[in-house]
Image (cartoon, grey):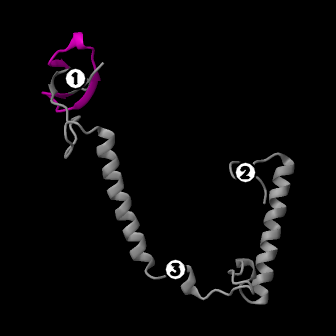
Amino acid sequence: MPLFEYVCNKCNFRFEELKSQKEDSATTPCKNCGGISDRQISSFSPVMAGGSSNETADMTIGREADKRWQSYNNRQEKRRGDKALQNFNLPKTKDGKFMPIMALGDKRTVENRKEYVGALQKHRKERTAKGISQFNSVGAF
């Protein structure tokens, strides 16, 4: 059943109504005041701008999505600048690999991080033992 758009001649109320092809009338009673409402030409159009007759809607939408993702990636690269991982001078182990985050910082920072991770692991074990899943229900920390 097609969706038709109507505007009341009396109160200018706009509304939509589903009508069968058999009920295809140009007027209908207003849902607001009961006056006569005329059918409007719908603002929806199935024609895609820039598409050729042998191009599907999916192809047109996909091309537009690719353009938007490329624009997003360009903005991200511009924001990051030259901040690649190797430019941060992070400490490395003897075999040339970057040190884990847990090992970075002064002695107190490392101790605090280990304490926090331990508390988090304990909390997760307690929730699992109680049968409470991790992130979709309320539970005491």
Q: Gap in Å between the C-alphas at discs 2 and 3? A: 39 Å
Residue 60 or 131: which is nearer the viewer?
A: 60
Which one is closest to the eye, mark 1 or mark 3?
3
Residue 39, by quadrant, is top left
Where is mark 1, residue-wise?
Answer: 30
Report crowding for label 3: few under 14, some 14 to 19, many 20 or more residues within 10 A (C-alpha).
few
Q: Which residue corresponds to mark 3?
A: 84
Tell me which residue sits at (81%, 53%) in the image.
127
Where residue 115 sits, quadrant-wise, is bottom right
In percent of width and height, residue 57 lies at: 29, 39
Q: Is residue 11 above or below residue 73?
A: above
Q: Secondary structure at mark 2?
A: loop
Q: Earlier in the sequence, mark 2 or mark 3?
A: 3
Say what amino acid the circle numbered 2 marks.
Val
Q: Quick check: is 7 in the magenta stretch?
A: yes
Residue 56 image offset from top left, x and y in percent = 29, 37
Relative to 68, is 102 on the left or the right?
right
The image shows residue 80, relative to residue 56, as above or below, that is below
Q: Which residues are magenta?
A: 6-28
Q: Looking at the image, which is closer to me, 104 or 13?
A: 104
- The amino acid marked with disc number 3 is Ala
Query: Is 60 above or below relative to 66?
Result: above
Question: Is residue 37 covered in magenta?
Answer: no
- What residue is rendered at 31% in x and 51% in y? 64
Residue with the mark numbered 2: 138
Q: Amino acid at mark 1?
A: Cys
In this rendering, position of residue 117 left or right of residue 74: right
1 or 3: tag closer to the N-terminus? 1
Dot 1: element: loop
